[in-house]
Image (cartoon, grey):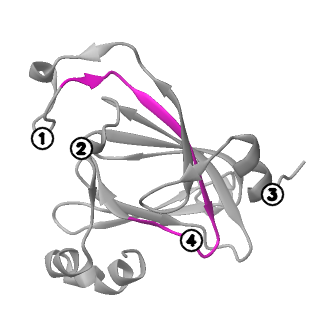
Amino acid sequence: MQYSASWWREKLQLQSHVEGGAFRETYRSEWMLDMSTLPAGMTGNRNASTCIYFLLEYGEFSAFHRIAADEIWHFYDGHSLTIYEIEPGGNLITHKLGRDFEKGERLQVIITAGNWFASRTEVEGGYALTGCTVAPGFDFADFELAERAPLQAAYPQHAGLIAELTR
């Protein structure tokens, strides 16, 4: 059975996200990791792991951003999601999150800590319902939303894509 994006938004009680799309946190580990055990760039203690639902509809995008932890994306329903990841050296990786393995899609995609990434569904009228697991757990103190001009200056070979996927 195929559900609509609005059905999922209501059933999962999703709220607008600052990067675009809609989300709801579903898990925040009670285990706390001491700052001394965490990678550089994290400014305080962190929950061991967090998890959210994340929904994007055609015409929306999750703007380029980066976080200080690895992020694992999971596909749940709808259409494929394209996730663009820029490594520090400028290499662009285009991931396809979805069910069609014959088209190179995968049910899980891992985004490396510190890399810039953005996403959108490219199926007209479509949507993608996904989940994101972050470990160490997500904290907005570790979140950076890209500014278009500085990101384009850092990666001029991707200026067009950056213009499309920043606000």
Q: Position of residue 37 (x, y in %)?
A: 14, 20
Gap in angstroms between the C-alphas marked 4 and 1: 30 Å
Find numbered disc 2 in the image and state the secondary structure of the residue it sits on.
helix
Find numbered disc 1 in the image and state the secondary structure of the residue it sits on.
loop
Residue at 52% from the left image edge and 38% from the top image edge: 52
Residue at 22% from the left image edge and 80% from the top image edge: 152
Please indicate whether residue 12 sits to the left or right of residue 83 in the image: right
Gap in angstroms between the C-alphas marked 3 and 1: 39 Å
Residue at 69% from the left image edge and 56% from the top image edge: 100
Residue 125 vertical placement versus 106 (above, below): below
Q: Quadrant of the C terminus?
A: bottom left
Instruction: Quickly name the residue at label 3.
Output: 4
Instruction: Quickly name the residue at label 1.
Output: 41
Q: Residue 142 — which label?
A: 2
Are dots 1 and 2 in contact, CB under 8 Å? yes
Please indicate whether residue 101 sits to the left or right of residue 150 in the image: right
Residue at 56% from the left image edge and 71% from the top image edge: 60
What residue range appears in magenta? 45-63
Are dots 4 and 1 in contact, CB under 8 Å? no
Amino acid at pointer 4? Glu
Of callouts 4 and 1, the N-terminal one: 1
Instruction: Quickly name the residue at label 4.
Output: 60
The picture quadrant where one finds residue 70 is: top left
Q: Position of residue 89 (x, y in %)?
A: 16, 65
Gap in angstroms between the C-alphas marked 1 and 2: 8 Å
